Amino acid sequence: MTTELSADALTGLLERARQDYQDLAERLLSLDLTRGKPSPEQLDLSDDLLSLPGGRHTAADGTDVRNYGGLQGLPELREIFAGVLQVPVAQLLAAANSSLELMHDCLAHALLSVLPGAESRWVDQQRIAFLCPVPGYDRHFALCERFGIDMIQVPMTADGPDMDVVERLVAEDPAIKGIWCVPKYSNPDGVSYGDETVARLASMSTAAPDFRIFWDNAYAAHHLTDEPVEIADLLAACDEAGNADRVFVFGSTSKITAAGAGVAFFGSSPANVQWLLGNNSKRSIGPDKINQLRHAIFLRDADGVRAHMERQRALLQPKFEAVARILEAELGGTGLATWASPKGGYFVSLEVQDGCAKEVVRRAKEAGIALTPAGATHPYGNDPRDAFIRIAPSYPGLEELERAIEGLTVCVRLVGYEKQAS
């Protein structure tokens, strides 16, 4: 990544970077790029939800949404999202507002009850491990830490996790029970899984008979270009490969409508759906069906989802374009960093020189720019290269975002040139 510089050239660049950083610190900024939350303007797009269901309390099948029951969720809402998430309606469950809760529950239930195809509960086994493609999503890693599940890093490629590594590990170690996947516009690098990757995940041999792919399709409808990325249908591929129970599909409306009042989805084989419903029936008599009804009325159908996401895109795309423009203008050709150019999703992955990410984040914080901690993209918060920084462009206003990214590039130049000069 680094570019060879003469001593005089490096000295000049370092002096300029130090002056730029001093100027940045004197501006007394207070900017936040830490988490991928929808902006207030994005949330405003769903304000009509607040007046729905408008006195109506009956679902399409006659269900009184005010009452108990309906653990699988409203059929009309499941129909809207079946195609988006690539899950047949009968095998899709609509739940409360957070897909993270569903992932948590699936882990807890697997530990405490026997999965379809399993020989025993996970908690009764000596060791449990998950594969974690990196860079990846910090909340996935936090779930593993909470339950004492060992995490094994797997490098990401342009087509998804390195499948040579994945296939070797799952074939030889029965303690490896799962893999985390964000298959479309992945968090944080924006990678979408290629067809071969999906096929290999579906058909690979695993030493654990109860191996599960946690398919967190969080950005299934979150496109940023005129050419939406489509991924292969993993659930169908697993069924065709004779591994119907292998995949748990997760999704939600959290970054589609109201992040704090959305609907989460779980899809899988009939056996897995019945396993989850059976376990969930012990802790709930049914989800918030009033919220599900208002979402069904508001979104109407799959075309309604696409139209709504185009309005989301109109707000998000200029922010991602601004990030790319500023990074290129300030860091292009320096050899100090590379970055993703995602076609969708919510994040940009910035890769700085090895050994520099923590220091860049620290200098940015001192200058009033809050970033996700360096290392958050890796299990246990430990990026062995100390190179990855996650940028979340969605929440700040455009001008605020531009100031933050400009300030971040100052920190990257300062830390990078200091390292080269040391």
Image: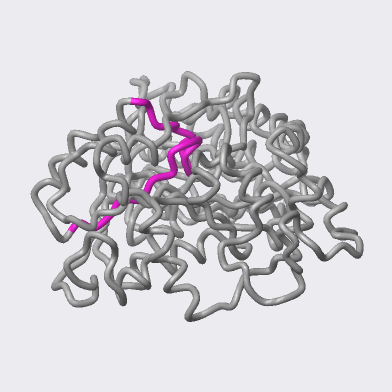
Front residue (pair 327, 238): 238
Magenta stretch contains residue 190 = yes
Q: How many marks?
A: 0
* Residue 225 visible in the snapshot: yes
Q: Residue most toward the front?
A: 62
Would you say 146 lies left or right of 99 here? left
Q: Position of residue 54 (x, y in %)?
A: 91, 60
Front residue (pair 23, 52): 52
Q: Position of residue 215 (x, y in %)?
A: 41, 47
User: Colour mode?
Assistant: one colour
**Residue at image point 41% right, 50% down:** 377
Look at the picture and state if 246 lies above or below 241: below
Q: Residue most toward the bottom?
A: 282
* Residue 410 visible in the snapshot: no
Q: Main secondary structure of the magenta part?
A: loop
**Residue at image point 52% right, 34% down:** 15
**Residue at image point 34% right, 45% down:** 134
Instruction: State the quadrant of the C terminus.
Output: top left
Where residue 45 sits, quadrant-wise, is top right
Q: Position of residue 246 (x, y in %)?
A: 30, 49
Would you say 331 lies left or right of 398 here? left
Magenta stretch contains residue 208 = no
Instruction: State the quadrant of the N terminus.
Output: top left
Look at the picture and state if 173 lies above or below 193: below
Front residue (pair 268, 307): 268
Magenta residues, start to end: 176-195
Front residue (pair 55, 326): 55
